[in-house]
Image: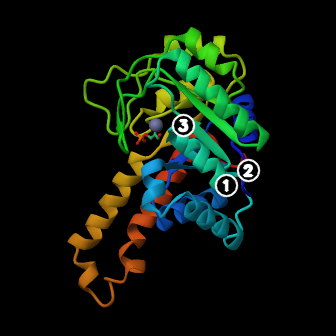
């Protein structure tokens, strides 16, 4: 069932687990994630970046595909379609297209402008029952053209944004998009705990979920993180499984070149990765 992310994250925060946001790129990604959620009775958030939305044919195409699968694959767990790192204009387009949740990423604006724009998006979204994620500080690295400096969030700024009626808040705490460098210092738990105290009940979001060690994930959840974003890890496991299939020459055996066969190992690899993350985040059987 298609819902906003608000209720599922309130429940997650109360019960001390996190809901995974898994980014989608095409039909295989979407189907793999939805089926894994169904098989594990887990709520899920489908993340769609503006770039991936365009790639899939536009936001309306994405909404149509997700709605069709929810119906025809009998998906009864809570599912949100969420715009990932949205611009001000992108957030409005996604809402108009039927997204049930949007991130307005105003982290590259100064805090006053971030507050003003976030407030406007919250006003529009709230009237339509759509959840909103805001961002303070920034996530290091690059994701789909969105580049962040990796600036650790100021807890006071987090407080100001959290009071605007946002459903969830992403704060930079040393997390990075993509693969973590070998000399990565780890998450800043002192800042996370300060942010968690100062923002009260607002569920916190951890971006850059790929490659964060399990113990750090568990600690982050214990400090109020209720949504964790994973993108690169599914891409890596998909690519690895697909490469293996081709390197073993399976595309040349019989009708191994049929895309339904060629993409099957990658599809199964995404399912495996998503299940492992759901186990780690504690969202299994929480639908
Ligand atoms: O917004 C999406 C994410 O923060 C995903 O990060 O690609 O490092 O897993 P990741
Ligand atoms: Zn992100």
Residue 167, image quadrant: top right
x and y, in percent, of residue 24 in the image: 49, 55
- Whichever of callouts 2 and 1 sits on the residue coming sooner in the sequence is 2
Is residue 79 found left or right of 36 in the rendered image?
right
In this figure, which residue is indicated by the disc labeled 1?
98
Q: Please say if 228 is above or below 268.
A: above
In this figure, which residue is indicated by the disc labeled 3?
88
Q: Please say if 52 is above or below 142.
A: below
Quadrant in which ligand 1 is drawn: top left
Residue 7, image quadrant: top right
Viewer-side label of 2, 3: 3
x and y, in percent, of residue 226 in the image: 63, 32
- Whichever of callouts 3 and 1 sits on the residue coming sooner in the sequence is 3
CB atoms at circles 3 and 1 under 8 Å apart?
no
Q: Nearer the viewer, residue 277 or 88?
A: 88
CB atoms at circles 2 and 3 under 8 Å apart?
no
In this figure, which residue is indicated by the disc labeled 2?
3
Instruction: Report the residue at 25% width, 72% height from top.
Output: 246
Instruction: Report the residue at 27% width, 66% height from top.
Output: 244
- How crowded pointer 3 is (Cα within 10 Å; few <14, some 14-19, many 20+) is rated as some
Q: Is residue 45 visible?
A: no
CB atoms at circles 2 and 1 under 8 Å apart?
no
How far, Cα to Cα, is label 2 from label 3? 22 Å
């Amino acid at each position: 069932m298609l819902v906003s992310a608000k209720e599922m994250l309130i429940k997650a925060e109360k019960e001390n687990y996190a809901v995974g946001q898994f980014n989608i790129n095409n039909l295989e990604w979407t189907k793999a994630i939805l089926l894994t959620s169904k098989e594990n009775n887990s709520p899920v958030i489908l993340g769609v970046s503006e770039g991936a939305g365009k790639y899939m044919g536009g936001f309306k195409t994405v909404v149509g595909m997700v709605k069709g699968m929810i119906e025809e694959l009998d998906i009864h767990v809570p599912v949100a379609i969420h715009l990932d790192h949205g611009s001000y204009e992108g957030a409005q387009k996604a809402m108009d297209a039927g997204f049930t949740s949007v991130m307005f990423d105003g982290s590259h604006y100064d805090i006053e402008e971030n507050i003003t724009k976030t407030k406007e998006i919250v006003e529009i979204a709230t009237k339509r029952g759509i959840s909103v994620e805001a961002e303070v500080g920034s996530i290091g690295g690059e994701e789909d053209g969105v580049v962040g400096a990796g600036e650790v969030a100021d807890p006071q700024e987090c407080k100001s944004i959290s009071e605007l009626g946002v459903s969830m808040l992403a704060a930079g705490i040393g997390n990075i998009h993509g693969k973590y460098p070998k000399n990565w210092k780890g998450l800043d738990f002192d800042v996370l705990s300060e942010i968690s105290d100062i923002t009260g009940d607002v569920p916190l979001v951890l971006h850059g979920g790929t490659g964060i060690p399990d113990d750090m994930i568990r600690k982050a959840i214990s400090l109020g993180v209720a949504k964790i974003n994973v993108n690169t890890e599914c891409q890596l496991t998909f690519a690895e499984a697909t490469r293996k299939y081709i390197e073993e020459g399976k595309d040349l055996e019989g009708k191994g070149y049929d895309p339904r066969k060629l993409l099957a190992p990658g599809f199964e690899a995404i399912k495996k990765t998503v299940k492992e993350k759901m186990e780690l985040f504690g969202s299994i059987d929480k639908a």
